Image: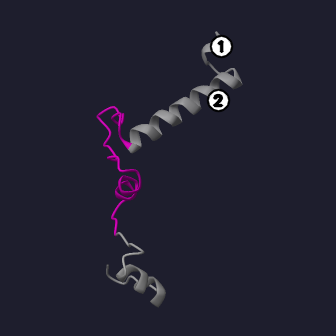
Amino acid sequence: VKDLMLRDHGRAAATAGRFWVYAADHVDQVMERLTGMPAGHPDAQGIYPEGTVNGSVQTRLLQWTALRQELAGGGGPQSR
């Protein structure tokens, strides 16, 4: 990677296979590497597919939003 700077002990660890450096152009590449799941791309409605990192994040955020609305009495299931 151009302009990557490692201290000597970091370079030695990488050479010995005890430390890895991965280049990424986008955070989705990092999330795929960390989770082993595809990042996923949104459809025309902005919905990410199940089984993807972004789909899991989107689902969780929607759950939290619904819970917040319910607890605040703002249109959740219990406010009817």
The image quadrant of residue 41 is top left
Image location (x, y in percent) of residue 17: 36, 76
Image quarter where the N terminus lies is: bottom left
Most common secondary structure along the magenta stretch: loop
Mark 1 is surrounded, within 10 Å at the Cα level, by few (under 14), some (14 to 19) or many (20 or more) other residues, namely few
| Mark 1 lies on residue | 78
Image location (x, y in percent) of residue 5: 42, 85
Residue 16 sits above or below residue 63 on the image: below
Q: Find the distance from the CA under tag 2 to the CA under tag 1.
A: 12 Å
**Horizontal placement of 7 versus 48: left or right?**
right
Inspect the image, locate mark 1, and give the three-letter code of the amino acid beneath it: Gln
Question: Which of 65/18 is in front?
Answer: 18
Image location (x, y in percent) of residue 74: 65, 22
Q: Look at 32% across and 39% down and name the residue there.
A: 42
Q: Secondary structure at mark 1?
A: helix
| Mark 2 lies on residue | 68
Mark 2 is surrounded, within 10 Å at the Cα level, by few (under 14), some (14 to 19) or many (20 or more) other residues, namely some
Q: Which residues are magenta?
A: 23-52
Image location (x, y in percent) of residue 31: 40, 54
The image quadrant of residue 50 is top left
Question: Which of 33/60 is in front?
Answer: 33
Q: What coloring was used for the rendering?
A: one colour
Residue 60 sits above or below residue 72 on the image: below
Inspect the image, locate mark 2, and give the three-letter code of the amino acid beneath it: Arg
Number of marks drawn? 2
The residue at the far top in this view is 80
Q: Look at 38% across and 79% down and name the residue there.
A: 14
The residue at the far right in this view is 72
**Horizontal placement of 80 versus 25: left or right?**
right
